[in-house]
Amino acid sequence: MEAAVRVDTSGAACPVPILEIAKAIRRVPAGTVVELISTDRGLEADLPAWCEATGHTLLRMERRGASYVGWVRKAGEVPGIHGP
C-alpha cells in the first residue's frame, strides 16, 4: 500500500507511536494516507482504538517480522471531491 507519509517509531514504546502518528496526521490534508511502523506490539490494539476515537480510517494492519505496520487515511472532506 502506498502512503504519502511514513512514520517509523521502531524501538519506541507506548504512547510514542500514537503520539507520532497524531502529529503526522495534523500536518497533512484530509484523505492522505499515513503509514506507521512500530515494534511495540500494543499497536495492534492501540491504532484501531485511536482511529475509532478520532474518526480516521484504519485501512490495513500487518506484521512484518518484529514490526507492526498500519496505514491510516486522514478523516475529513477531501478537496475537489463532493458528496452525492
Image: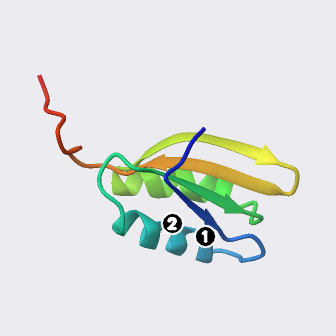
Q: Secondary structure at mark 2?
A: helix
- 58 and 28: which one is in front? 28
Q: How many marks?
A: 2
Residue 4 place in picture, x, y as percent: 49, 52
Image quadrant containing the C terminus: top left
For the residues labelled 2 and 1, the Cα–Cα distance comes to 6 Å
Left or right: 55 in relation to 77 = right
Q: Secondary structure at mark 1?
A: helix
Image quadrant containing the N terminus: top right
- 32 and 21: which one is in front? 32
Left or right: 51 in relation to 77 = right
Q: Residue at x 75, y 60 (%)?
A: 41
Residue 25 place in picture, x, y as percent: 40, 63
| Type of amino acid at the residue the image marks with label 2 | Ile
Residue 42 place in picture, x, y as percent: 69, 62
Q: Residue at x 81, y 48 (%)?
A: 64
Q: Residue at x 78, y 75 (%)?
A: 11
- Neighbour tally class for label 2: few under 14, some 14-19, many 20 plus, Cα within 10 Å: many
Disc 2 + disc 1, Cβ < 8 Å:
yes
Left or right: 41 in relation to 70 = right
The residue tagged 1 is 17
The residue tagged 2 is 21
